[in-house]
Structure formats: structure tokens, C-alpha cells
């Protein structure tokens, strides 16, 4: 095996697998290094469902979503399998919710079609829901979900089909960069390439540290649960949509749900979790009280889930920036090093696009997108 490549990609989760695929498609000699195994459950990219949507409270993400949807469809065609499931979705909440009003404004700015429903209309369409009279509701037909594990595996498989080399269980020990080369060392091998792409999620700072850079990141332990209610047909699309509740200035900390599209169960979670010291120090055993903590939400908004059979609770990681926006940038001292993520718990839906963006940046090309919001220097003192 040659130890010289055009590009080395560190981390084979959502972003890294997509970057490797897009780079390999251009004919680059790509090495994809993963410290665990593909589709491991130690990070942020494992599981059967992640939300995909146009509806965002910042217009920059709506613009990115308009480019991401076609790339997921292209990936489905290339992989020959269904990865994206369109279900429709609703945003709802109290009228004075800042995040709700910003979401409506961003959709209008980008001409995203929405339906404004009264609570009674929403409940007629989606009979499992109970929505108070003082709430506003908007429905967007293009909401859906991505099978996260299948997406990662498809990107990896297609990257390999285009000639990329994958090495699993290869934890990086050191990283260095010169003007026209990078060197990456694992316990077993030293690899060289012209360029480096870092997509390491909660381990990002451990790799950037070797290149004299540090980002203000916080790793959080997040848990989500699956339930099997009675009348399960009421919780499957199209009778049950993706559900996002808005209660204040931010979506952080509030519940969301994904319909039972594959028989595994209806998914509920809080969009947040407690901070942990590092990605290597996470307790992956779920807390037993998660199903009970969701009962007040069920009582108010989805009464048919009160006391529903709890199937499983799972743990994943959010790697948060202080402002919850992404980081997509080039190293300030090494033009041949680019990095992306952490995505603060809302990045998977963009990973096909971010992989393409990283490929272009790595090759010295324009990304084709406004990345100002995601610059790393916004955290400079």
C-alpha cells in the first residue's frame, strides 16, 4: 500500500465520508482514515433517522438546503437505494417565539412554499397531535428524514468505487503540515499527502491542536428515544409529520420528533444535552429516565404517546460552537488544510453538500456558496 496520496480525510462520519466521495470522483488519490469502524456509534453520524428540511431560522441554512436536496437525490441514484424519505413536517409554537418568526421570514425570503394551518386544521390532518388554540402552525411538504447510517455507508462505498482507500481503526497520533504537504501518523503507519481535510466532530480540536489551532468547542451528550404507541398507523407518514416545536428565541433544548417510517418506532428527543469533558469520556449507556422526561410534552401535544411502549434510548454527540453555527474553513496558516463541522447537532442534512464544498476548497476552487457565517475567525479574541 502506498503511503502517498493527494488528499487525506480524517474522520469517516457524515462529513468525511461525503468529502472522500466528492474528492475521489474528481480523480484524486484519497485516503480516508477512521479511528473506529464505519457506522460506529461513538460520534454523531449513526442511526436510522436525521431530519432534512428547508425550514430554518437563519436564511443561510435555507440557501444551503436548496443545494443539499439535489445532492441527496444524486447520491440515491448513484447508490441505488432509498436514503431520503419525504414525510412533510410542521413547525409550531407560540406566536411570540423568535425562532418561529425567523423561520417563517427565512422561508419567505427564499420562496419556500408553506401552508399556514390553524390548530384545528393541523389536528384534522394529523390526528395524533393536540395543538393549543394559542399556537401557530406552518406545514412544509418537503420535510423528511435521512437514514444516517445508510447515507454514510453509501458515501464510503462510492468513494471506494472511485478509488479511495479506507482504513478503519486508525486513530491519528500526530498531524503536521508544510507548504505543499501534510503528514499523518497513526500507531501503524505514517501517511503523506498534498492536502488534508479534517472532519472529526468531537475530536476536531485534538487534530487541529497539532497544527497550532484551537476552536471553542463543547461536546454534549444527547439522547433520543423510540416508542411504539397504540394505533401505530397514526404515527407513520403521511399521517404523522416531522415535528418541531418553537417556544422561544432558539430551537435548542426543545423536543422534536421523527415519524415511524420503517417500523422501528417514532423518535423523540430534546435538541440538546449536558456537556462532557471530551468525546473520549462519554458514557454511552443511556439514562433510564429519558422516556419519563418526555411525558409532559406527550401529555400536552401528543396524548396518544403517554405511557407508550419505550423501545430503546440511544446516545450520540453534539459538538457545539458558542453560536451554534457550523465551522467550514481553511487553516489560517496552512492553505492545504481545510476543516468542517462541528455542526452543533443540526448538520447531517447538509453533509452531502459540505462534502462537496470541502472537496472544492481542498482543490483550491471556489465553494460556490457564501460561507461567511461559518468562518473560524469569528471566534478570534
Image (cartoon, rainbow, N blue to C red):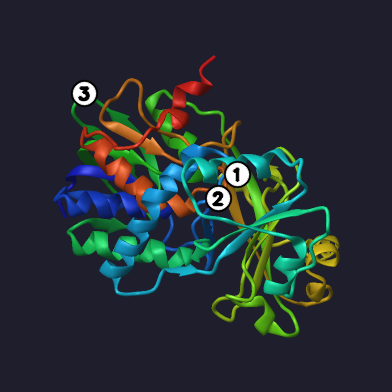
Q: Is residue 219 visible?
A: yes
Q: Quadrant of the N terminus?
A: bottom left
Earlier sequence position, callout 1 versus callout 3: 1
Circle 1 or circle 3, nearest the eye: 1
Look at mark 1 in the image and give the residue it sits on: 103
The residue identified by callout 3 is 179
Which of marks 1 and 2 precedes in the sequence? 2
Q: Earlier in the sequence, mark 2 or mark 3?
A: 2
Vertical position of residue 31 compared to residue 243: above or below: above
Looking at the rendered structure, the secondary structure element under dot 2 is loop
Q: Secondary structure at mark 3?
A: loop
> With 46 as the anchor, is 224 left or right in this view?
right
126 with respect to 162 (left or right): right
Characterize the local packing of mark 2: few (<14), some (14-19) or many (20 or more) Cα atoms within 10 angstroms: many
Position in image of residue 349 (x %, y %): 47, 54
Neighbour class for label 3 at 10 Å: few (<14), some, many (≥20)? few
Question: Camera-side residue: 205 or 361?
Answer: 361
Which circle marks residue 55 in the picture? 2
Question: Quadrant of the image for the C terminus?
Answer: top right
Between marks 2 and 3 in the image, the one whose residue lies nearer the viewer: 2
Amino acid at each position: 500500500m502506498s503511503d502517498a496520496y493527494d488528499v487525506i480525510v480524517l474522520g469517516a462520519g457524515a462529513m468525511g465520508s461525503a468529502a472522500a466521495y466528492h474528492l475521489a470522483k474528481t480523480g484524486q488519490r484519497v485516503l480516508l482514515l477512521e479511528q473506529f469502524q464505519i457506522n460506529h456509534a461513538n460520534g454523531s453520524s449513526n442511526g436510522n433517522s436525521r431530519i432534512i428540511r428547508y425550514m430554518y431560522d437563519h436564511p443561510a441554512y435555507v440557501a444551503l438546503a436548496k443545494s443539499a436536496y439535489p445532492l441527496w437525490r444524486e447520491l440515491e441514484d448513484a447508490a441505488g437505494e432509498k436514503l431520503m424519505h419525504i414525510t412533510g413536517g410542521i413547525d409550531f409554537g407560540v406566536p411570540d417565539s423568535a425562532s418561529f418568526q425567523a423561520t417563517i421570514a427565512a422561508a419567505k425570503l427564499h420562496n419556500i412554499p408553506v401552508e399556514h394551518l390553524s390548530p384545528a386544521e393541523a389536528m384534522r390532518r394529523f390526528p395524533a397531535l393536540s395543538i393549543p388554540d394559542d399556537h401557530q402552525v406552518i406545514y412544509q411538504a418537503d420535510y423528511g428524514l435521512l437514514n444516517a447510517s445508510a447515507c454514510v455507508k453509501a458515501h464510503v462505498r462510492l468513494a471506494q468505487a472511485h478509488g479511495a482507500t479506507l482504513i478503519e481503526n486508525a486513530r491519528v497520533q500526530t498531524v503536521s503540515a508544510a507548504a505543499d504537504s501534510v503528514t499523518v501518523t497513526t500507531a501503524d503507519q505514517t501517511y503523506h499527502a498534498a492536502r488534508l481535510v479534517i472532519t472529526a466532530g468531537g475530536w476536531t480540536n485534538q487534530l487541529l491542536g497539532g497544527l497550532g489551532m484551537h476552536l471553542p468547542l463543547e461536546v454534549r451528550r444527547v439522547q433520543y428515544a423510540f416508542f411504539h404507541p397504540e394505533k401505530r398507523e397514526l404515527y407513520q407518514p403521511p399521517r404523522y409529520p416531522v415535528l418541531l416545536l418553537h417556544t422561544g428565541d432558539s430551537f435548542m433544548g426543545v423536543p422534536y420528533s421523527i415519524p415511524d417510517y420503517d417500523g422501528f418506532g417514532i423518535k423523540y428527543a430534546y435538541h440538546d444535552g449536558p456537556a462532557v469533558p471530551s468525546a473520549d469520556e462519554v458514557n454511552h449507556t443511556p439514562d433510564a429516565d429519558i422516556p419519563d422526561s418526555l411525558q409532559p410534552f406527550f401529555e400536552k401535544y401528543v396524548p396518544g404517546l403517554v405511557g407508550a411502549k419505550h423501545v430503546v434510548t440511544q446516545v450520540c454527540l453534539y459538538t457545539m460552537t458558542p453560536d451554534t453555527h457550523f465551522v467550514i474553513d481553511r487553516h489560517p496558516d496552512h492553505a492545504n488544510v481545510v476543516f468542517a463541522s462541528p455542526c452543533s447537532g443540526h448538520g447531517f442534512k447538509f453533509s452531502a453538500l459540505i462534502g462537496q464544498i470541502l472537496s472544492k476548497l481542498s482543490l483550491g476552487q471556489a465553494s460556490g456558496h457564501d460561507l461567511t457565517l461559518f468562518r473560524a475567525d469569528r471566534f478570534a479574541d
